[in-house]
Amino acid sequence: MSERISREELVRIYNVEITFFDSLEEAGLLTTETEDDIKYLQYDDLSAFEKFTNWYYDLEVNLAGLEVINHLLSQIEKMRRENERISKLI
């Protein structure tokens, strides 16, 4: 079994609203697993949750902004990997 943390525990530890967590999941920014009606986040995805939490609460970026920023960063990373691949061919 992989390591994970429950939604309720994350909400308590990070002092965020449960609706915020659910909004991240609904927007596709987080992927959870459900077991016995309890939602879990994999520890591997914890850094993404922390990043979104910081942007939302500290920088006051709304959910739509989180989606845009996440998409742009994903595109940048994709281009970086492609550039790296191309530079190895040259």
Image (cartoon, grey):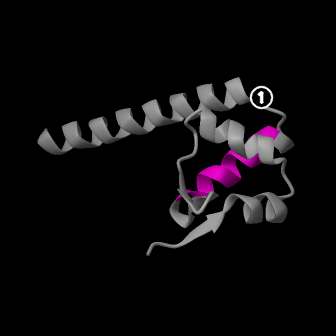
In the figure, 23 relative to 13: above or below? above
Residue at image position (78%, 31%) is: 61
Q: The residue under label 1 is which amino acid type?
A: Asn
Q: Quadrant of residue 25?
A: top right
Residue at image position (82%, 38%) is: 59
Residue at image position (79%, 57%) is: 11
In the rendered image, residue 8, in percent from the top left (x then y), is placed at 75, 61
In the rendered image, residue 53, in percent from the top left (x then y), is placed at 75, 47
- The span shown in magenta is 45-56
Which residue is at the front of the view, 79 or 19? 19
Q: Is residue 32 left or right of residue 10?
A: left
Q: Quadrant of the C terminus?
A: top left
Residue at image position (65%, 51%) is: 49
Residue that extends furthest to the front in the rendered view of this protein: 36
Predominant secondary structure, magenta span: helix
Count of all numbered marks drawn on residues in the image: 1
Which residue corresponds to mark 1? 62
Q: Quadrant of the N terminus?
A: bottom left
In the rendered image, residue 78, in percent from the top left (x then y), is placed at 37, 36
Q: Quadrant of residue 57?
A: top right
Q: Residues within 10 Å of mark 1 (few under 14, many from 20)?
A: few
In the figure, 43 relative to 28: above or below? below
Residue 73 highlighted magenta (yes or no): no
* Element marked by disc 1: loop
